[in-house]
Amino acid sequence: MEKGINDTDEQTIKNTLKSINSKIIPDKDGNGFYRVFCDENVEKVNPVEFYKLYELQKRAIIYRDLLIMKTPFAARLSDDFFIRFAKEELSKENFWEIKEQIEIHDNFLKLLETTRKKDQESLLRGMSINPDQLISLIFKSYNIYGYLYSRYRFENFPKGFESNIIPKIANIEEDGAIKIIGETDLSEGQVKNILEQRKVIISHFFDKDNEWHCFFTTYNSIGGKENWKDGQPHFHYISSAFGITRDKFIESMESGQYKSTSIHIDLLGNNGD
């Protein structure tokens, strides 16, 4: 039987709440701050338990931040208060129930039953997916087929900045301006150069015994900088049927020189755009 977040040991939730990887970065005027949740690599977990616990942790931390900003006295409240409030809000929203019920194309489910590259290529030809459908697929891969889940983030900066202080947050705005949050010894032009040249890969693995499937995307793909349908954001796909071991493929992503694959799955917004 699937274990719900309400069945998770309370002490476990409180312990992990303290260890969750997030940082507070004060804004320039000192009147507020940014809370940044850092993506950590996840290795062969039950994705249902992982994502439900992680969302609960994030909600509890954000609610605590917001309440303390309104009334500093809230800092005296225990973690139990914020965890309970986060649970109640998630329950009111039917947050996970809605996501679990999202329909995905049958081809993605059939994919998890295949072991032949030719069949996988045929099933994924012309397919598209959005973030909510991806979460639904991740949950179904475990609940229906027993696949464990892994998520990895790989980032490679251009050479020459190894000794510099990289800002915690940086972004190129629509008007071309560079927004920098956090300490750095780099100029805006140098930060822009790093943002434009770095290689970032986000991968989602489905593992069962010796079989694995991987959907991965890059910041260049998300930003419309890859040569696919005039900049259409997309996922790439590769699996244990492609003649490369899981370890070797991970090594290739770590170096930024990953094995190419001709399979592209359009990445759409949740509204289908």
Image (cartoon, rainbow, N blue to C red):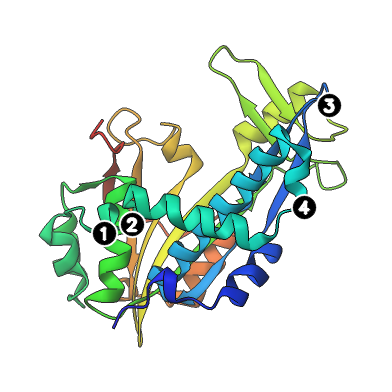
Q: Disc 4 residue type? A: Arg
Determine which residue is flagged by label 3: 30
Determine which residue is flagged by label 1: 100
Determine which residue is flagged by label 2: 96
Q: Of discs 4 and 3, which sits in the foreground? A: 4
Q: From this viewpoint, which residue is outermost toward the top?
A: 175
Q: Nearer the viewer, residue 27 or 261?
A: 27
In terms of secondary structure, where does tag 4 sit? helix
**Quarter of the image containing the C terminus?**
top left
Answer left or right for 221 relative to 117: right
Q: Disc 2 residue type? A: Trp
Label 3, residues with CA under 10 Å away: few <14, some 14-19, many ≥20: few
Q: From this viewpoint, which residue is outermost toward the bottom?
A: 209
Tell me how far mark 2 sits from mark 1, CA to CA.
6 Å
In terms of secondary structure, where does tag 2 sit? helix
In terms of secondary structure, where does tag 1 sit? helix
Q: Are marks 1 and 3 in contact (CB under 8 Å)?
A: no
Whichever of labels 4 and 3 marks the residue nearer the N terminus, that label is: 3
Determine which residue is flagged by label 4: 76
Q: Residue visible at 25% across and 33% down?
A: 271
Q: Are marks 2 and 1 in contact (CB under 8 Å)?
A: yes
Tell me how far mark 1 sits from mark 3, CA to CA.
41 Å
Q: Residue visible at 57% across and 65% down?
A: 41
**Quarter of the image containing the N terminus?**
bottom left
- Report x, y in % for residue 2: 31, 78
Look at the image and tell me whether residue 50 can be seen.
yes
- Report x, y in % for residue 224: 41, 31
